[in-house]
Amino acid sequence: MLKYEDQSLLTSSKKRILVVEDDIQMSKFIQFKLDYLGYDVVGDAINCEQALDRSRMLKPDLILMDIMLEGGDDGIETAQKIIDRQHVPIIYLTAHEDEVLFDRAKITEPFGYLIKPFNDRDLRIVLETSLYRHAQDKRIKRALQDVRNIINSAVFIMITYNLEGHIIEFNKMAENTFGLKRKIAKKRSVITLLDDQADSAILLDGDPLAVHQHEEVNFKDEAGKPFLCLVVLSPLQGSDDSLQGRLLVAQPVV
């Protein structure tokens, strides 16, 4: 068990935790443990309705969720309703190592699991790693939004797509030129933007690691009106330098 003198094992700043547990004694035990480890228990709930209401009002940094809540929605269904409304990390509490249950829980993308009974060390580790991962996710999302803002401010058409041709990103200039919303474009293949299907060889064939400059490609907008573009194709690589697809930058020929 942790000792109070061992400050290195305690959180450096208080994070706000909501406990969703229908066993009152277990809930009190968990809250005591959280307080002992230096966390701030902002509230507790025993069912889906309370959990939804208190997560919305209290805006916790993390939720500990009993996976087998009694009556109405269980913990998995409750978690799904919460994350549909707000981005908060959820850790499941369970007394059973049930593969079927875990498979169901995966769809909510939990940040971790705790098998009851658990000790202070297990609780601390899963909380700290989940909070760290959540913070990193937020930083990545902010960085991606910054990149998207830069791409959207470009005066050129910018489209990224994977090696099979499925569109990944579609900037504001592409939306305006094609008359096609980004969320719709992302469900399509880049080939559907072509007026002449023979040009698919330019977009998909050849060396994906090569840079192709000033290619002429015939596109069409959502209304079917054709237009010609000068296109530059570059490889799209991930953070680990693996090939993800291609970046297409295009300028309509006036």
Image (cartoon, helix red, strand yellow):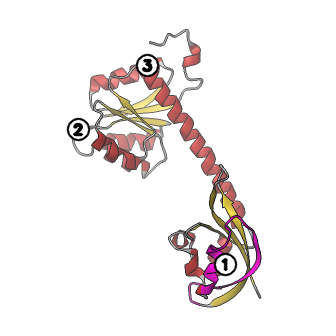
Q: Quadrant of residue 201?
A: bottom right
- Write the residue at 57% across / 44% down: 137
Q: Write down the residue under mark 2.
A: 70
Q: Quadrant of residue 222?
A: bottom right
Q: Quadrant of residue 6?
A: top right
- Camera-side residue of 102 and 76: 102
Residue 120: which numbered mark, if any?
A: 3
Mark 3 lies on a secondary structure that is helix
- Camera-side residue of 240 and 97: 240
> Is 109 above or below relative to 174?
above
Magenta span includes 201: yes
Kindly report which numbered mark, 1 or 3, lies closer to the viewer in this rendering: 1
Q: Amino acid at mark 2?
A: Glu
Mark 2 lies on a secondary structure that is loop
Tell me residue 124's x, y (percent). 48, 24
Q: Write down the residue under mark 1.
A: 202
- Camera-side residue of 6 and 36: 6
- Camera-side residue of 244 and 227: 244
Tell me residue 74's x, y (percent). 28, 43
Tell me residue 134's x, y (percent). 54, 40
Q: Amino acid at mark 3?
A: Asp
Tell me residue 105's x, y (percent). 35, 44
173 relative position to 254: left or right = left
Give the magenta-colored segment's residue range.
198-224
